[in-house]
Image (tube, rainbow, N blue to C red):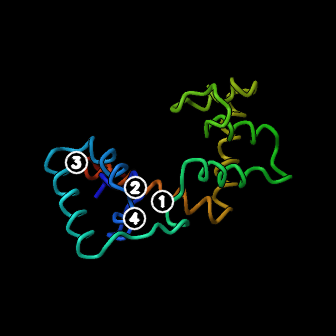
Amino acid sequence: MSALATAQVATVGELLALDSTPLNRLVAREAKDTRREIRTRYQEWTKRLGKQRTVSDQLMGLDDAVGLLMSAVSAPRAATTRRRAAELILGVTPGLDAFASSAELAEKLGKTTPRGIQVLKELQDDWAKNTDARELLDAITEIAKQVVTDFGGSPR
C-alpha cells in the first residue's frame, strides 16, 4: 500500500516494527477509510503476532541514503565539480531548488549549461556503477511509480 511506502514498509513484519507514534503520523495524511484499515490491521497483527524488532539494515534513513550516494561520487577520481553538483542535488549544500534544471545547476556551479548536462550524466554513470547506489535509486523509482499508479496515474 503506497500509504506505507514512504516509511519503507512493505511487509507485515516491517509494519509491526513501527511504533504507534510514527505510524499515526504516517497515516494522518491518508483518507479516513485508509487510516482505519491500516490501524485495524496493525492492532490485529500486533495482537496475533506480537511486536517485531526492527532490523537495522531494512530501513534506510535520508542521511544514510545521501551518504551512500555521495560515497559513489566521492572516489578520488571524482572531479570536484561532480562532487559539488551531487552535494547541491542531494541537499548537502543548500542553494539549489529541488526541481532545478540542468541550466540552474550549471549556474550554481559556475559552469556552462552544456557542462551542467554533462555533470548530470557523469553522476548518473557513477551511481549506476555502484551496486548499492543503483539499488537505492531503483527502489525509489519503484516507490514513485507505485504512488503514481495508486493515485490513478500511468507511470512510464
Mark 3 vs mark 4: which is more N-terminal? 4
Q: Position of residue 35 (x, y in %)?
A: 20, 50
Q: Quadrant of residue 92?
A: top right
Q: Amino acid at mark 1?
A: Ala
Q: Which mark is residue 139?
A: 1
Please identify the quadrant where the N terminus is shown: bottom left
Using the numbered discs, state the Cα–Cα distance from disc 4 to disc 1 in whole angstroms.
Answer: 20 Å
Residue carrying label 4: 17
Residue carrying label 3: 152
Q: Position of residue 44 (x, y in %)?
A: 20, 68
Mark 1 vs mark 3: which is more N-terminal? 1
Using the numbered discs, state the Cα–Cα distance from disc 3 to disc 4 in whole angstroms.
Answer: 29 Å
Nearest-to-viewer mark from 1 and 3: 1
Give above or below for 99 relative to 123. Answer: above
Using the numbered discs, state the Cα–Cα distance from disc 2 to disc 4 in whole angstroms.
Answer: 20 Å
Q: Nearer the viewer, residue 87 or 127?
A: 87
Tag 2 secondary structure? helix
Contact between marks 1 and 2 (CB within 8 A): the answer is: yes
Mark 2 vs mark 3: which is more N-terminal? 2
How packed mark 2 is, by other alpha carbons closer than 10 Å (few <14, some 14-19, many 20 or more), is some
Q: Nearer the viewer, residue 44 or 103?
A: 44
Give above or below for 8 relative to 123. Answer: below
Residue carrying label 2: 143
At a point 65% along the width and 52% down the height, the residue shown is: 69
Q: Position of residue 73 (x, y in %)?
A: 74, 50
Mark 4 vs mark 1: which is more N-terminal? 4
How packed mark 4 is, by other alpha carbons closer than 10 Å (few <14, some 14-19, many 20 or more), is some
At a point 55% along the width and 59% down the height, the residue shown is: 136
Q: Quadrant of residue 46?
A: bottom left
Using the numbered discs, state the Cα–Cα distance from disc 2 to disc 3 in whole angstroms.
Answer: 14 Å
Q: Amino acid at mark 4?
A: Ala
